[in-house]
Amino acid sequence: MEEFLSKLSDFAVEYGLRIVGALLVLIIGLNLVNLIIKIARKSKAFSKLSSDTARFTASVVGIILKLIVILTCVAILGVPMSSIIALLGTAGVAIGLGIQGSLSNFAGGIILMIFRPFHVGDFIDTGTYAGTVESIGVYYTYLITIDNSRIVVPNSVVSNLTLRDFSTFDKRRVDIVFKVDYSNDVEKVKSVITETVRKNELVLSDPEPFVRLSAHGDSSLDFTCRAWCASENYWKVYFDLTEEVKKAFDQNGISIPFPQMDVHIKNS
């Protein structure tokens, strides 16, 4: 019994100290990592980065430092590093197979941070999703739609899609097609549309508005109108011109087409 207690005492002294040491390193290490990240984000180097890049970099650095702290704790407990490396290798393969999607998202996030195809605050359209970029995380990109809902898009999807960024330039072109009846005079229609567009204060004079007859439809003459405006005014100009041109048509006696069907009845 005395021998058992002696061995138990030796075990407690040897491994107890290691466990206490590992716990201290873990607690102090994690707090130190958080402190380092907090100080780094306030440094001049981070201040030169955009908010999305700084957030992403801080997340990656934090994960790496915390992993180092955990490995140090395992080493303090007396586990051989060769065994740790072998275990990490085996676990890495298994985890990699299980979280292929997450790894793809992480890789996609790195690609977005390096090549910067868009920025926080840009309005983008992926073909499936459209909205203002709220943030770019390690695994996901967050969009706020026009109707104020949030869309969470995996970075692996965003980094591999063809995107339209509507916020890259300060000017956008508004394209609208106006349809009128065949009985209307072409020059008069062009003049009315052009005058109405030029009266709109949000429409830019350079480049000049463009109005031309573009197609002979089945039951209408189609006039294409192209007007430039500041990017932030795009939808206001689009809806304003749609309403204003209709009112101008009414004031100038320009008729719009209606679907018609001619029915011929033959007497047998």
Image: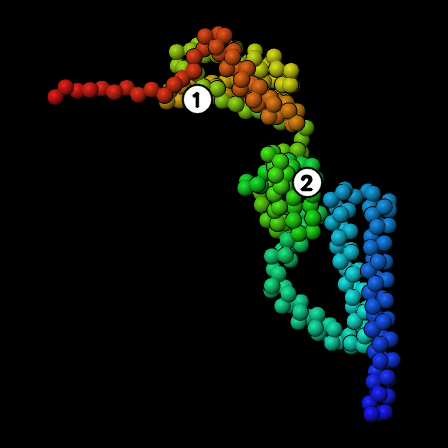
Q: Give the residue displayed 38% in from the left and 18% down from the top.
A: 258
In the image shown, does 64 or 8 lie closer to the viewer? 8
Q: Give the residue displayed 85% in from the left and 91% down from the top.
A: 2
Q: Which mark is residue 215?
A: 1
User: For mark 2, does the 10 Å Cα neighbourhood hold few (<14), some (14 to 19), or many (20 or more) residues?
Assistant: some
Q: Quadrant of residue 229?
A: top right
Q: Quadrant of residue 10?
A: bottom right
Residue 166 shown left or right of residue 222 in the figure: right
User: For mark 1, does the 10 Å Cα neighbourhood hold few (<14), some (14 to 19), or many (20 or more) residues?
Assistant: few
Q: Where is residue 233? Give x, y as percent.
A: 64, 24
Q: Which mark is residue 134?
A: 2
Disc 2 versus disc 1: distance between alpha carbons?
Answer: 41 Å
Q: Where is residue 60? Give x, y as percent.
A: 75, 55
Q: In terms of sequence position, does the residue under pointer 2 or pointer 1 come before the other?
A: 2
Residue 141 shown left or right of residue 69 in the figure: left
In the image, what residue type sits under mark 1?
Ala
